[in-house]
Image (cartoon, helix red, strand yellow):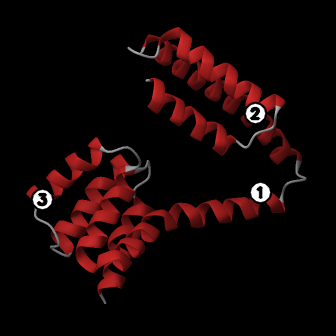
Amino acid sequence: MIYWQIFLAFFIPGILGYGGGPSSIPLIENEVVDTYGWLTVHQFSEMLALGNALPGPIATKMAGYIGYEQAGIPGAFVALFATIAPSMILMIALLGLLLKYKHSPQVKKMTQLVRPAIAVLLGIMTVNFFVNSISMEGAGYFHTIVIGVASLLLLQKWKVHPAYVIGGALLYGAVFL
C-alpha cells in the first residue's frame, strides 16, 4: 500500500504541475505534508532548501529522498518513476503522433522551424560557457583553449567517443585546475 501512496503522491503533481519543478513543488508539499503526513512543513522546507543546493531537477531529488525515507530503496525507485512517468508518457504519445503524421507538410514545416531555434539556443549556451570558462579564476584562456582544441581534435579528427572526451576533460581539470 505504501508504494501505491508514494506513486500517487508524485504522479499527480507530475501531471498537474505544468512548468516543471517550481510549479509542482506546492503540489508535492500538499501530498507529502497534508495528505499523507510524511513530513512537517518545517522538514519539507529544509528538504527543499537542501534540494535547491544540489544540482539537477528539484522534483526528482525530492521524490528520491521522500521515497527512500518512507520505503527504502524500492520506495525511492517508485517515487522517481512516478515523478518522470507523466513526462515520459506524454513524450511517447507525442512521438507516436509525430511519427504517424511525419509525412504531413505541416509536421515537416514545424520540424524545419524548430531546428534553427535549437541551434541558436545551443550556440548561445556554448558562447556563455566559453565566456564563463575564460573569466573563471584558475582556468583562464590557456586551459579553455587547450581543452577546446583537444576536444575538437578528438571528436572530429580521431572520432573518439564523447564520453571519453568528457572523462578526459574532467581528468585534465582535476589535475591542472
Under tag 1, what secondary structure? helix
Against 97, residue 70 (above or below) is below
Q: Locate residue 69 relative to residue 146 in the image: left or right.
A: left
* Alpha carbons under labels 2 and 1: distance apart: 31 Å
Q: Given this view, does label 1 or label 3 mark the residue nearer the observer?
A: 3
What residue did someone put label 1 on? Answer: 98
Residue named by callout 2: 155
Front position in the image: 92 or 151: 151
Identity of the residue drawn at 37% across and 63% down: 13
User: Looking at the rendered structure, which numbered label has been put on residue 25?
Assistant: none
Q: Quadrant of residue 9?
A: bottom left
- Which element carries disc 3, helix, strand or loop? helix
* Image x and y of residue 149, in percent: 69, 19
Q: Nearer the viewer, residue 109 or 20?
A: 20
Determine which residue is flagged by label 3: 43
Left/right of residue 177 with respect to residue 145 in the rendered view: left
Q: In the picture provided, is 118 more to the left or to the right than 24?
A: right
- Amino acid carrying label 3: it is Gln
| Image coords of residue 76 (percent x, y) | 36, 71
